[in-house]
Amino acid sequence: MLCLLVFVFTVDMVRKHKLREEYSVLWLVTSLLMFILVLKYDLLVAITNLIGAGLPTTTLFLCANLFLILIAMQFSFRISKHSNQIKNLVQENALLRLELEQLKKNTESTK
Amino acid sequence: MTRFTFFKLVPEDICMASLNHTVVIIPAYNEELAIGVLIAAIQGVVGDFADIVVIDDGSNDSTADSARRAGAIVLSHPFNMGYGITIQTGYKYAYSKGYEYLVQIDGDGQHDPEYIPSLLEPVMNGAADLALGSRFLDAASYNPPLLRRAGMYFFGSLVSLLIGRPISDPTSGYQALNRSVLAFFTNDSFPCDYPDADVLLMLGLNGFSISEVPVRMYANVAGKSMHSGLKPLYYVFKMLLSMIVTLLRKRSPYTGAGRSGKHAD
């Protein structure tokens, strides 16, 4: 139930431009995966036995955990990229500001 | 990829480029008291030979105005970005204006401007691509606190080992460099916090020649420093990681003044 809600919510957010498509991928994939696992209980049990977890709920928790790790990683990459972009903007800003001041001085002296 | 093309030197710009070949860049943050005196002192040493550029890292005092009144060119960051980025702004400016040689000196007055010529000398006659001002080679300099000294010694030795050249003062911000090093530093593929051991490592691995020159540094009178604020433990971790990654990275072969004697652009 929750998975369906998350799935629908995510799609809606993308539609409303409140969430970028790149971030939505992980949310959609995970919620879909969880949904399938819950529906096909046998599949969940099979995976649980495969990874050696005690209870099927553990598997679900592990999935959620993995999801959080991945999404945090995605954010880290994005933030690093942004930091670099900000740095370049600040530097260009400083250089442009100087050029502007010099231009203003030049036009004023030629008036 | 960087969108730095706006400031690439274009033929029409040559006439707008400065007449001098050398520039002295001064990164400064809230140094309204020291900056005027420092600029005057530098002017006394270099005269008309070099231009002076102050990069104001988002100071909230009158640093920029004091610098301008003292006759320096001033670049201003809209907000505080930190020493490494500030110095790179200076590099980008210097490169775009066609300067051949650059000297960097701290804005708080800790570095003695009298040593600028001795820093420029090995770079200008091609003996080195980068001349590093070491406070430990000069007996008159102050000694930094023990923990910092230990760190400097450790990283200095590490870098010395890896690039095959003894480095006694890896964190010295008092340096002179040539245009090839400038080109290297303004490339976005090498983001780093200048100046430091990992940068020296990067230079060494890419074929640049580094030379050390004894200089004089004074203790921090006002008590605040642009380099402070970073927890020592985090610094050590960051440096080690950076150096390991540098060792793993691809190296671009370089033929420059230090090696072949010819000046590459």
Image (tube, rainbow, N blue to C red):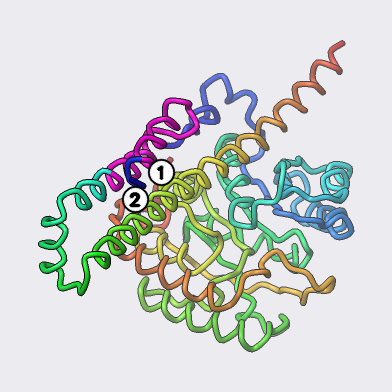
Asked whether residue A51 is in view, the answer is yes
Q: Which residue is mark 1?
A: B264
Q: Which residue is mark 2?
A: B255
Which residue sits at x=53%, y=66%? B196
Where residue B257 appears, as percent x and y from the top left, is 42, 52
Contact (CB < 8 A) between labels 2 and 1? yes
Image: magenta residue range? A5-31
Task: Name the subunit of mark 2.
Answer: B
The answer to whether residue B54 is left or right of residue B60 is left
Which residue sits at x=74%, y=52%? B46
In the image, is residue B88 part of the stretch drawn in magenta?
Answer: no
Where residue B3 appears, as percent x and y from the top left, is 47, 32
The front one of B153 and B223 is B223
Instruction: Kindly state the secondary structure of the residue where label 1 is placed.
Output: loop
How many labels, in total? 2
Instruction: Kindly state the secondary structure of the residue where label 2 is placed.
Output: loop
Which residue is farthest bottom?
B146
Is A82 located above or below residue B143 in the figure? Answer: above
Is B145 located above or below residue A104 in the figure? Answer: below
The front one of A20 and B90 is A20
Q: What crowding class fits label 1: few (fewer than 14 Cα within 10 Å), some (14-19), or many (20 or more)?
A: few
Q: Earlier in the sequence, mark 2 or mark 1?
A: 2
Task: Name the subunit of mark 1.
Answer: B
Secondary structure that dominates the magenta span: helix
Query: Which of the 4 image quarters holds residue A43?
Result: bottom left
